[in-house]
Image (cartoon, rainbow, N blue to C red):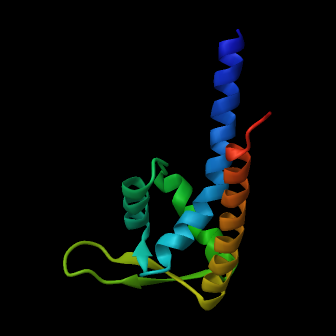
């Protein structure tokens, strides 16, 4: 029973941790170039162990758009259907700077705790 409780706890913790990271990672990926949704999913799968579904990324992108952190526009393709590209706004870039500072500070704090030796 304890093992099942531990597995449930870890699964729930991972889910919450992932939710907090997804916006940050998407904004990080958009800092260098506009991307369409499936491209963001592919990049995330390539660079992280986080798996994200289309049903998760599009509502998240719409929320970031509503917050004024990204814009979107449709682009015609030489072949195939048009794609909606998402681009980081100036506000999004500013928010990314604040997020980077916070993540750096948080990582530093966790590292200090991990290195701390109990006497």
Q: Residue at x 71, y 65 (%)?
A: 105
Q: Residue furthest bottom?
A: 90
Residue 31 lies, with reference to residue 57, above or below; the image says below
Lateral position of residue 117 relative to residue 97, left or right: right
Q: Residue at x 62, y 82 (%)?
A: 92
Task: Give whichever of 23, 82 is nearer the camera.
Answer: 23
Name which quarter of the figure residue 107 lies in.
Answer: bottom right
In the rendered image, the quadrant that contains the N terminus is top right
The x and y percentages for residue 47 are 41, 57
Residue 80 lies, with reference to residue 116, above or below; the image says below
Total numbered badges shown on the rendered structure:
0
Name which quarter of the figure residue 98 lies in.
Answer: bottom right
The x and y percentages for residue 70 are 58, 80
Q: Residue furthest left?
A: 79
Residue 99 lies, with reference to residue 51, above or below; the image says below
The x and y percentages for residue 84 are 42, 76
Q: Residue at x 67, y 56 (%)?
A: 20
Q: Residue at x 54, y 64 (%)?
A: 25
Q: Residue furthest front?
A: 119
The x and y percentages for residue 81 are 29, 73
In the rendered image, the quadrant that contains the C terminus is top right
Task: Give whichever of 92, 99 is nearer the camera.
Answer: 99
Q: Residue furthest right?
A: 119
């Amino acid at each position: 029973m304890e093992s099942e409780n531990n597995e449930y706890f870890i699964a729930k913790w991972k889910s919450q941790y992932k939710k907090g990271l997804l916006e940050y990672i998407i904004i990080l990926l958009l800092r260098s170039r506009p991307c369409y949704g499936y491209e963001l999913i592919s990049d995330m799968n390539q660079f992280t162990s986080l798996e994200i579904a289309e049903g998760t990324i599009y509502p998240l992108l719409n929320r970031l758009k509503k917050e004024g952190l990204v814009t979107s526009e449709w682009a015609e393709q030489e072949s195939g259907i048009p794609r909606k590209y998402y681009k980081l706004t100036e506000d999004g870039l500013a928010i990314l700077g604040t997020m980077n500072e916070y993540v750096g500070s948080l990582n530093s704090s966790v590292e200090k705790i991990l290195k701390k030796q109990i006497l």
